[in-house]
């Protein structure tokens, strides 16, 4: 095992995405390792040959942080091949590489792996049924990726998160969309019967760097699934109203509607709040509550 004081390399796969960008710009980037951001132009995780060539220097004690994903939930319904290639095959190729090199792998997944259910309590990793059949191609492909990773590298760590936001350009997320619509419409309707865990990408990035440090020091084991989100929960309508309030707009301009009134090609989970208990049990710092994180996102956006 390579300790934190030994030189090592940390590869951030998916560096151009929302979470990848947050990881590379985080205040928590370690200064005792070489951090290499890799975009799709640097590595094609769907190709075993590209993974082998791009990670040819991967060595024991190095870390691969995989935040690359096919995230267009609706498009995945008719592009299953592309979704599975990126979300299932790609992580499997990375896990084979880390296992062979005795390196560490952290693979980021999603709340969509949970099928529709009657849950009304925050979900633990153990609440996912062994025979789980997610309701969307996106969720099924991400679950296949989780399972492929843990089969190929028994020391890998899977981290599920949900409702990721950054709140500022050039990212197009729920928060930036609500800010734009606030300036364009007198009123808007937002779904109020889907409840989840809004998660600020910079906060999650800090948490992933803490997990990385623990893996490098040998203080955390692998082969586990953790949940990491900001604290608290909300419906999309709650979230939108909080954005309005945070920028000084009247939150009553956001009107609730049902999922049935806003149909999408892919089914959305009615309840997918993730419990942070597994994160805390691993000795990791809980992420703060989402309203506090949202205010920081809005403040940074306004000042930027």
Image: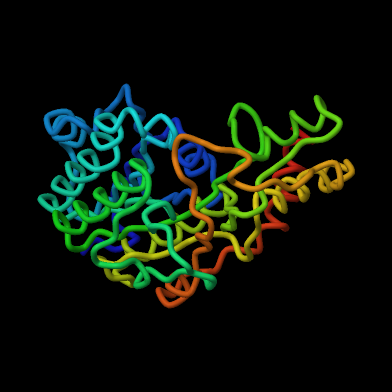
From what the image shows, is residue 230 above or below residue 56? below
Q: Quadrant of residue 250?
A: top right
> Viewer-proximal residue, 74 or 96?
74
- Residue visible at 44% across and 33% down? 74
What is the basis of the colouring in this image?
rainbow
Q: Residue pushed farthest front?
A: 260
From what the image shows, is residue 119 above or below residue 302? below
Q: Quadrant of the N terminus?
A: bottom left
Q: Quadrant of the C terminus?
A: top right
Residue 280, percent from left and from top: 48, 74
> Viewer-proximal residue, 25 or 281?
281
Residue 110, percent from left and from top: 41, 52
Q: Is residue 235 left or right of residue 43?
A: right
Q: Is residue 266 left or right of residue 232?
A: left
Q: Is residue 249 left or right of residue 198?
A: right
Q: Quadrant of residue 234?
A: bottom right
Q: Residue pushed farthest top?
A: 41
Q: Is residue 51 left or right of residue 291?
A: left
- Residue visible at 33% across and 44% down? 66
> Viewer-proximal residue, 3 or 261?
261
How many numbered badges does the structure rendering display?
0
- Residue visible at 33% across and 70% down? 220
Q: Quadrant of residue 113?
A: bottom left
- Residue visible at 66% across and 63% down? 289
Residue 78, percent from left and from top: 34, 28
Residue 209, percent from left and from top: 45, 55
């Amino acid at each position: 095992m390579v300790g934190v004081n030994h030189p090592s390399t940390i590869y951030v796969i998916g560096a151009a995405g929302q979470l990848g960008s947050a990881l590379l710009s985080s205040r928590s980037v370690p200064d005792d390792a070489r951090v290499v951001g890799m975009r799709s132009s640097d590595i094609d995780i769907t190709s075993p040959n590209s993974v082998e060539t791009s990670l040819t220097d991967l060595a024991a004690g190095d870390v691969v942080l995989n935040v690359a994903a096919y995230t267009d939930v609706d498009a995945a319904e008719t592009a299953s091949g592309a979704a599975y290639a990126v979300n299932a095959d790609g992580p499997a190729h990375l896990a084979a590489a880390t296992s062979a090199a005795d390196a560490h792998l952290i693979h980021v997944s999603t709340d969509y792996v949970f099928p529709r259910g009657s849950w009304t309590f925050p979900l633990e990793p153990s609440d996912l049924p062994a025979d789980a059949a997610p309701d969307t191609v996106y969720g099924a492909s991400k679950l296949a990726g989780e399972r492929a990773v843990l089969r190929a590298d028994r020391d890998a760590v899977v981290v599920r998160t949900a409702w990721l936001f950054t709140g500022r350009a050039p990212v197009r997320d729920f928060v930036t969309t609500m800010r734009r619509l606030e300036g364009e419409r007198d009123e808007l309707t937002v779904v109020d019967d889907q409840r989840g865990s809004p998660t600020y990408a910079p906060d999650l990035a800090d948490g992933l760097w803490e997990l990385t440090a623990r893996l490098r020091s040998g203080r955390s084991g692998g082969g586990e699934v953790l949940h990491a989100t900001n604290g608290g929960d909300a419906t999309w309508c709650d979230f939108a109203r909080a954005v309005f309030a945070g920028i000084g707009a009247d939150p009553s301009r956001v009107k609730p509607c049902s999922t049935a009134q806003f149909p999408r090609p892919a089914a959305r989970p009615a309840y997918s709040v993730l419990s942070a208990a597994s994160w805390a049990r691993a000795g990791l710092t809980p992420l703060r509550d989402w309203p506090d994180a949202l205010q920081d996102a809005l403040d940074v956006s306004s000042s930027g």
